[in-house]
Amino acid sequence: MMNNSCPAILIAAPASGHGKTTVTAAMARYYRNCGLKVRCFKSGPDFIDPMILEQASGNPVYQLDNWMVGEKESQKLLFEAAKEADLILVEGVMGLFDGTPSSADLAERFNLPVVPVIDAKAMAQTFGAIAHGLVTYRPSLTVAGVIANRIGSTAHLDMLSEGVADNIPVIAALFRDDEVALPSRHLGLVQAEEIADLDIRLEQAAAMIGKSLKDWLPPLVDFIAPKLTIIKPSLQGVTIGVARDSAFSFIYRANLDLLKQLGAELCFFSPLEDKTLPTVDALYLPGGYPELYLDQLAQNSQLIEAIRSHVMKNKVIIAECGGMLYLLESLTDKSGKQAKLCGILPGNGFMQTKLVGLGLHTAHLPEGALRGHAFHHSKIDMRIAPLGETENRRTNGRGEVIYRHRGISASYLHYYFPSNIAATVKLFQNHL
């Protein structure tokens, strides 16, 4: 059986907010500066962290997940990366054991050694107790060591190390520094392209973590070749317009790869800047932050008219989360400011101060079942009957409503197209 070997680790934490992305990005940039080809992955369905990791590593970043992405697809992505990379860094999601499946499940499935990052601010020997718990909670996991984040001084690091068992190496540390930390907002970190000094922050973080990493490398991991799925060019001749800018940026790279492999031609456009649509058969409006660009979106009336014309021809639109909000009559932000938007879907959106929906879902569409993820701070007052509701992966979790209107398929769900290739083909072929 063919396999590729590569040094690899999964960088985890006790919970969200401990600095996994900062540490993973710092390590990626440090090893890249050392001349290594670094491939990063993100455990779970996150869009924003991969943007940071792409800039840190200089290479594309894909999601890994035992359920949404699937074990077979995750295996393929890791195997292909190990063929070309000198180092693989996988950033975990939430806490190490949180969720079903969890980062720990992913690490165990692919024999990835785990390196927990622990926020050590306002902590001393208790650091060791947390490290001990993470190491021993699931004995089947291999833990390569721990990383101390946001330490105050070398003396502070000494105190932390005193509480750590001899069999748990403290392999690296990052000092508490606002010029290194990554800024955040309501859906997570600020997007990479919006952080003007991101490269400066990455270089400073790399230099800082490099002082303790020095020549340390993760252990070698064998990644086994999967059985490949033959993808037929079933969308040959179909041109898909993909909205992509600061307002619409939540796009799985694997989705775009699949559409290209299916033979589709992708044309990217910006609802913020472009006045016309490219000549396309279908539109893909992903999620993002339309609420941060209300005036600019509302004032681009020429593009709105072009999208309305597309709809009147009953052409396909796949609208996910922020893309769906953009098609509504209006969207009101958290301060009460309202903007009139496309007016294509008969409803109005309202940003909320708290999280409204979060989780993994299956959408049982007429075309087939597609898996995906929802994460939103808005509600919609819609005046059309829904097509149905997604199935939440959590037993008692609520679903997300799916709407169909003319050629539009809209919901809060961010679809992962490779989860059902046949359904994806049918989704973009409808009404053509």
Image (cartoon, rainbow, N blue to C red):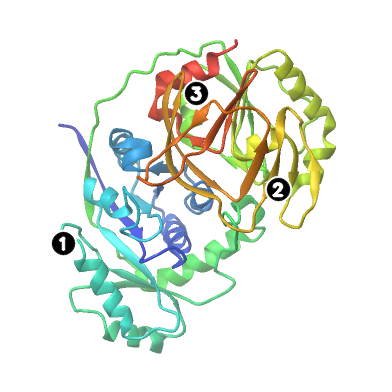
Quadrant location of residue 138? bottom left
x then y, percent, for residue 254: 45, 33
Left or right relative to 179: residue 153: left
The quarter of the rendered structure image containing the N terminus is: top left
Identify the secondary structure beneath mark 1. loop
- What's the CA distance linking mark 3 and mark 2? 28 Å
Question: Which residue occupies 41% across, 29% down?
Answer: 418
Identify the secondary structure beneath mark 3. helix
| Location of mark 3 (residue) | 259
Amino acid at pointer 1? Pro
| Location of mark 1 (residue) | 139
Left or right relative to 274: residue 86: left
Identify the secondary structure beneath mark 2. helix
Question: Which callout, 1 or 2, points to the residue nearer the camera?
Answer: 2
Say which label, 3 or 2, has the lower sequence index: 3
Question: Which residue occupies 28% across, 59% down?
Answer: 114
x then y, percent, for residue 113: 25, 57
The crowding category of the residue bearing disc 1, from other C-alpha atoms within 10 Å (few below 14, some 14 to 19, many at least 20), is: few
x then y, percent, for residue 286: 59, 35
Mark yes or no: residue 169 visible.
no
Amino acid at pointer 2? Glu
Q: Which mark is residue 291?
A: 2
x then y, percent, for residue 37: 40, 48
Q: Is residue 182 above or below residue 80?
A: below
- What's the CA distance linking mark 1 and mark 2? 45 Å
Question: Which residue occupies 33% across, 79% down?
Answer: 127
The residue lying toward the viewer, choosing from 73 and 136, is 136
- What's the CA distance linking mark 1 and mark 3? 41 Å
Question: Which residue occupies 37% across, 43% down?
Answer: 64
